Image (cartoon, rainbow, N blue to C red):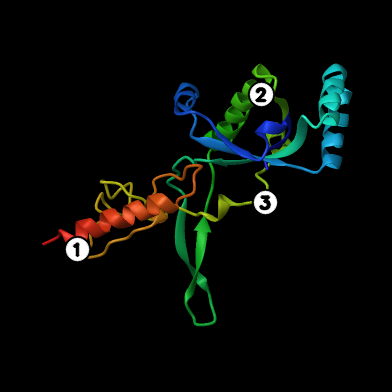
Amino acid sequence: RVGEILVDKTLSNRFYAVSPELQRRWKIFNCGFRVEEIPYSNTKKLIADLLCVAPNLGKRMAELADRNLICGARLRATWEQAPNSSNRIILSDNDTDIFGVPRVRLHWMKKEIDRQTIQKSMDIFNTYLQDEEKGRLRPAAWLTDALSYPSDDEIGGHHHMGGTRMHSNPRYGVVDQDCKVHGVDNLYISGSSLFTTGGHNNPTLPILQLALRLGEHLAGAP
């Protein structure tokens, strides 16, 4: 969760994303937001907090809430993580499962551009809400106070990707453009592990596209 929002009812329970043009302009990666409506009691608390810092705006929001025109909502983000060469998946040297197989160890760190992507994307979304008079946004404390990423929420959206990323140069990737493992004659990989980065959309359709593409390649192989 990256924040809370008082928003026009018509905009709740939807998904919003920063356009490619704005991504290029601000040199950030792609990012999208889910606006999830919260109970009315939580909405009243958001309005009470707003009344403390912006009384006139708070009164206006209270009137709109009474007329069921706005609601409170959680703001959740999914964003593209910048490639990080130090991230890797390895086997443990001393930790094994009940069958004696080494357990997997995940080294997963983020760069400063990842936090900047969220922060700037939220600024863009908040500007849109204010320009259109559709609501107001309050970022989560871990963003405004430069705290650690939360560990009690969705982590990676259950879509861990990029473990065998694709690149024509073996220095930067595990498989080539045909999904073949570099340096191995007859080993191919298909799946979201090939992704160079993970965007904000669900990965299922790109995975299917890669599988179909690999199937066509193998069918035409001598």
| Disc 2 versus disc 3: nearer the observer | 2
> Which residue, given by chain and number where applicable, does mark 1 sit on?
185
Residue at x-position 20% and y-position 56%: 217
For label 1, the crowd category at 10 Å Cα-Cα, with few meaning under 14, some 14 to 19 and many 20 or more, is few
The quadrant the C terminus occupies is: bottom left
Check disc 3 and report its element: helix, strand or loop. loop
Residue at x-position 23% and y-position 62%: 184
Q: Position of residue 40 (x, y in %)?
A: 83, 40
Q: Are marks 1 and 3 in contact (CB under 8 Å)?
A: no
- Using the rendered view, name the quadrant where residue 4 is placed: top right
> Which residue, given by chain and number where applicable, does mark 3 sit on?
153
Say if 142 sits above or below 212 in the image. above
Amino acid type at circle 2 is: Leu
- Using the rendered view, name the quadrant where residue 214 is placed: bottom left
| Disc 2 versus disc 1: nearer the observer | 2
Left or right: residue 142 compared with residue 60: left
Amino acid type at circle 1 is: Asp
Say if 176 sits above or below 102 in the image. above
Left or right: residue 123 compared with residue 28: right
In this rendered view, identify the residue nearer to me: 8 or 145.
Answer: 8
Amino acid type at circle 3 is: Asp
> Which residue, given by chain and number where applicable, does mark 2 sit on?
129
Residue at x-position 52% and y-position 72%: 94
